[in-house]
Amino acid sequence: MKAIDVQQLEKTYSNGVHALKGVDLTIQDGDFFGLLGANGAGKTTMISILTGTATKTGGSAKIFGIDIDKDHNKAKEMIGLVPQEFNFNIFEKVIDIVVTQGGYFGIPRKECLKRAQKILEALDLWEKRDHPSMQLSGGMKRRLMIARALIHQPKLLILDEPTAGVDVELRHGMWKYLQELNKSGVTILLTSHYLEEIEALCRNVAMIKKGEIVINGTVKEVLQSLDRQIYVVNVDKVKDIDELNTFKWKKIDDTTLEVEVDQKKTVNELVKILDTHKMLVQDIKPKSNRLEQLFLNLLNE
Ligand SMILES: Nc1ncnc2c1ncn2[C@@H]1O[C@H](COP(=O)(O)OP(=O)(O)OP(=O)(O)O)[C@@H](O)[C@H]1O
Ligand SMILES: [Mg+2]
């Protein structure tokens, strides 16, 4: 069963911006899927179409087999959305924000209260239940958005940049919670600028660039497809030697060089060359994590 099945999705905004250019994307039931893309790539536009806050100008979209054109409400019931921007009433109390949302889905108040307690406790917000939401910190607000999105027990949770502005410790706490949700059977789609986040959480990943999907596969496959890796090498003194030119490299300062190693060459080869020319290697490490490198390569193509 496909949780999301998007075919040839098109969106041209009324101001003429062509935000989605024939996007095909399928996400299987139970998946933890990451959508990567630079600012303005079209991530939020796609999510808005799936959740009904924007209308597509072409193509089709199904949520668990339900065409969003045919049964919009039913499709919407399947989705919990954590939007990119905070959009709750800042004067409303935490508990009310969550319970009211349940009301929109026709869930009886008593049941909503029961569910809300469980969710707010799990997200460490129960103590704050009677505070107006404006009194929450940024990280707490993010968690409140997650709590609100879960009250109707959706089969699919979509999070648009869920950990923007959340500190490392909290972010890891949120990751754990999302992983548990996913294990309990909730399909998760998240967009993120934190590549580390996609690598840590997701099984599958797609990258969208200027409204088109440019990469789609398992996180593992995508990493394997990366054939270049830049290493930062610290030596006692950088010398300009011919043999190094079989690599793409540049001198950063007197003791540091950056060398691009592709699949045809190995780090061993590099070390041997440096050794032969009496450049004493003090440290050698990848410049950034591989996914990040791939991301930057793609963005700058
Ligand atoms: N309501 C709108 N009206 C007109 N153009 C829009 C609207 N919303 C988004 N756009 C444009 O559509 C394109 C895609 O925007 P979108 O918000 O989907 O990007 P994004 O990938 O979510 O970016 P970010 O990472 O910054 O959130 C951009 O060029 C943006 O300016
Ligand atoms: Mg966005």
Image (spheres, rainbow, N blue to C red):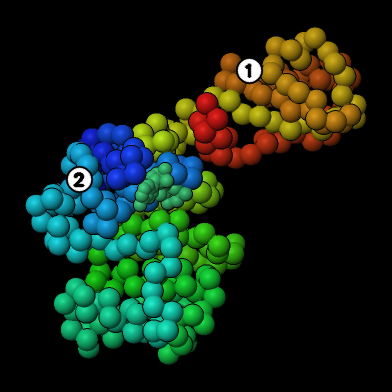
Q: Is residue 204 above or below residue 110?
A: above
Q: Residue furthest top?
A: 242
Q: Position of residue 147 (x, y in %)?
A: 37, 73
Q: Which residue is pictured at 49% across the width and 80% down the height?
A: 134
Q: Residues within 10 Å of mark 2 (few under 14, many from 20)?
A: many
Rounded to the nearest whole Å, what is the CA distance between mark 1 and mark 2?
Answer: 44 Å
Q: Which label was assigned to residue 265? A: 1
Q: Is residue 191 above or below residue 254?
A: below
Residue 56 is drawn in which quadrant? top left
The residue labelled by disc 2 is 61
Residue nearer the viewer, 83 or 239: 83
Helix, strand or loop under label 1: loop
Q: Which residue is pictured at 20% across the width and 61% down the height?
A: 76
Q: Earlier in the sequence, mark 1 or mark 2?
A: 2
Given the image, on which type of amino acid does mark 1 rest? Lys
Residue 36 is at least partly visible in this image: no
Q: Which residue is pictured at 39% across the width and 69% down the height?
A: 87
Residue nearer the viewer, 20 or 290: 20
Given the image, on which type of amino acid does mark 2 rest? Ala
Q: Nearer the viewer, mark 1 or mark 2?
A: 2
Residue nearer the viewer, 126 or 98: 98
